Amino acid sequence: MPQMVKAIANEMHIQQAFLSNSTIHTIYFGGGTPSLLSLEQISFLLNNIHQHFTIASDAEITLEVNPDDCTPEKLQAWRNAGINRLSIGTQSFREEDLKWMNRSHNALSAIRAIEQAHQASFQNISIDLIYGIPGLTTEAWLQNVQQATQLPIQHLSCYALTVEPKTALSNAIQKKLLPDINTDEQALQFELLMQWLPDAGFQQYEVSNFAKPGFESKHNSSYWKGIPYLGLGPSAHSYNGQWRQWNIANNSLYLQSIEKGIIPAEIEELTPSQKRNEQIMIALRMKEGIYFNQLSNLFSSEHKAALLSNADKWINRKLMEWLPEVQQLRLTTKGMLYADGIAADLFETT
Amino acid sequence: MKNIRNFCIIAHIDHGKSTLADRLLEETQTIGSREMMDQVLDDMDLEREKGITIKSHAIQINYNHKGEDYILNLIDTPGHVDFSYEVSRALAACEGALLLVDATQGIQAQTISNLYLAIDNDLEIIPVINKIDMDGAMIPEVTDQIVDLIGCKPEEILLASGKTGIGIQDILNAIVERIPPPAGDENAPLQALIFDSVFNSFRGIIVYFRIMNGTLRKGDKIQFVSTGQNYIADEVGILKLNMVPKDSLSAGNVGYIITGIKNAKEVKVGDTITLAANPGEMIQGFEEVKPMVFAGIYPVNTDDFEELRECMEKLQLNDASLTFELETSKALGFGFRCGFLGLLHMEIIQERLEREFNQTVITTVPNVSFHAYSTKGDKIVVNNPYEMPDPTRLDRIEEPFIKAQIITLPEYIGNIMTLCLGKRGILINQSYLTPTRVELIFEMPLTEIVFDFYDKLKSSTRGYASFDYSPIGYREADIVKMDILLNGDKVDALSALIHRSRAQDFGRKLCEKLKELLPRQQFQIAIQAAIGAKVIARETISAMRKDVTAKCYGGDISRKRKLLEKQKEGKKRMRQIGNVEVPQEAFLAVLKID
């Protein structure tokens, strides 16, 4: 067993009380390329999880995979090992886009991977698509989305291409070797997406996430609902309702620390005001927005009144709506385009 | 009196004046090396860092020369163009001057103008070439420059290094042997020249003076000639590293007086101290110092206005040349209209507010003081764009002109001509001081050097130009008020008074700059520059179509929250003009426009 896999199992052991022995409803292998793990390694980790935690019988267990790593045999083996949801990193069905993003797979192998997963009796398949790539026309984007919705998938994450600083991409754009992204174009493609996907049966439930009814990602929804989670491995983030913590990113330092029985994490205790700000930020990303009835211990009537009065200008501009009968404050479809700026504006100053 | 020598040091910035002064004090054991901090004469942080002696001081040196004790009073002079009047008063308090020239740099414009001031005051000039130990020292060339300039013999020029101490003894000897002792009658009515003052929070204003005639005793009832105000001399004394009280001081001496004055405005540099009972005449050369450049200063947070007011008041206590009055701006709230001696003075005030008082401020478009004449013949002094009368009521406007003196290398004459003529300058004279030093004299509108002139001059001569100026009165000019509008709302803090021929260009650049600095908002923003109702430039910021990040999962939440909190914090500092949010950098942008 590789050192890293063993270390993750060890971390699990050290952290087994982090979630206060509550029942686990979702497990997610992600943040990297977990499809590179051998079946034996995946089983080893799943066994360890079952030893240390109570897992609900209907738990959602997701594996993030690259289309290239999918073969009928592997897919079947993952399914047999208990994986019941796949997140396939398709990104695009257009060769130009895949080349532009330096992806190793091609459009056909992505389609094949989805079909084979379906044949391996995966009934909860998610894929992701990227838009706002230079050269992606509106027509091409529509074709891409149509291609996706014709496949046997239940869930779709669509992300606008983001240029992270200090990456090869941002360097190339700075040196004018590649055209810069056009945010107006991205906005248009996002707006169109929010029209097209519901027509194809995929409802938007978060800024970037669309699903057939009942197939919303339970795991990701937990993040947005403020439910505690435990992340394992280098760079992994955890939240227990009181504080957030994140492991060191450096692999060898992570291994050294776990070896000594120490979790190499930085901890951030949240003040009530910070918790409210987080709640505003993540709840507004969700279609259902802020449900005050479920948040009464975090938002007093004063907090609620202040928030609503701040939201007034956004409501007037039809970027937000307030449904008093259900005590729900949420973004309109148009407002989804400005989720960050509006959230920041509604923040309490700390 | 025959054993007193009063002298100053004339030097360009960075030519080593402060270091040389340190050596003189050290060599004469005026200060022990234990108390010796580098460059003791510059005691404000800012002066140390900028290498500019902003406020002049004085110090007494005791020196034994050939068995006789001498008192050498070193009077320090400020070293920037904005302070030429203060320099002239410090020079008037001396009989001699060290002309200090950097061996690697040669003579600079400012050195020359101060040298002329010294010669006008009949000072004995002792030329010193400093930094002779440096690699790039050009001793023969600099010697020639000095000989050409003051007509001395080469052997009269002293060679020194403030850093290593070479030549310090020669300088001390020359001060005693070449500079004449002060003249004056200690029994005549008192005439003491005020050359500086400082504020001390315990003692009030401490006034520095040089007695020309008469005697000043502790307890005397004194009078300031220009104001006619009487005071009691609570304490008089001489200036060592610390103040040393004395019972009396008489003609020829340099000292300080404390009278309990709290307001720096009552003490005017160049004024004469005399006795109320037996008044002497005003010493020649006194002028009321008038601010030349005006700008608004506003707190970044409107809540901090009262705090800023306190700081401005404290600042004025030790800088009487700073003037300010209350001003309100729709864009910026409450602030002050401030008058400065010049642009550097403005920068110094800004920096002192930041460093000494922890105030971050927004400074608005600076302007000079214009004279507007109405059709009825009234004269209106316009120090602020909103004071400009309606064009229909205007007969004419006059603007202040300066005589600008620039010294440079011959290869940069072309660039300087382009720069100065482009700024409405008129070439008055061009002469070669030495084969490699050219002096250019221009008459220019002062308003043209308020914007980016120094930086431009520096870049177009790669730093090989030095500049000095003096005001030469007012001339008629076609000055207009240019406004900036955001979605139709006027931003009063960005209005500018400008020559009509420059308005379009400036307006365009300002609109372009604002387009860079204003964040996109959820709607389109029109940026316009206008003279009256006539729009002369326009830029448009298109609406922001999207402001949402794609991913926000478990590992992104903390970072994302902090990012948005920071954004919120930044918004708090923005100013609302109509429906447009304007970051404070936008208000500072105008200062960066060429």
Image (tube, rainbow, N blue to C red):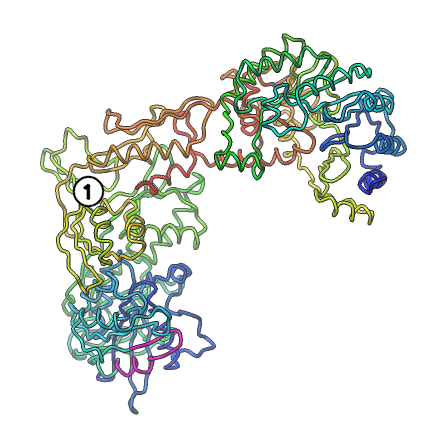
Residue in the image at 62% along x and 27% along y: A281
Looking at the rendering, in which quadrant would you find the C terminus of chain A? top right
- Mark 1 secondary-structure assignment: strand
Reply above or below: A267 against B413.
above
Instruction: Give how far across and how far down residue A80 sits, in percent.
Output: 87, 22
Instruction: Give how far across and how far down residue B476 sits, in percent.
Output: 12, 41
Span of residues in magenta? B159-174
Residue in the image at 22% along x and 80% along y: B155
Reply above or below: A235 against A39.
below
Would residue A210 be found to the left or right of residue B65 on screen? Answer: right
**Residue nearest the viewer, comparing B281 with B498:** B498
The residue marked by circle 1 belongs to what chain?
B
Residue bearing the label numbered 1: B370
Residue B164 is one of the magenta-drawn residues:
yes
Reply above or below: B527 against B19.
above
Would residue A12 be visible to someone looking at this image?
yes
Looking at the rendering, in which quadrant would you find the N terminus of chain A? top right
Instruction: Give how far across and how far down residue B277 sits, in percent.
Output: 18, 70
Residue B389 is one of the magenta-drawn residues:
no
Q: In which quarter of the image is residue A215?
A: top right
**For the image shown, how many numbered marks are present on the structure?**
1
Instruction: Give how far across and how far down residue A83 sits, in percent.
Output: 82, 23
Would residue A103 be found to the left or right of residue B6 on screen? Answer: right
Q: Which residue lies furthest to the bottom in this view?
A: B67
Badge 1, how many Cα within 10 Å: few under 14, some, many 20+? many
Given the image, on which type of amino acid does mark 1 rest?
A: Phe
Would residue B234 be visible to someone looking at this image?
no
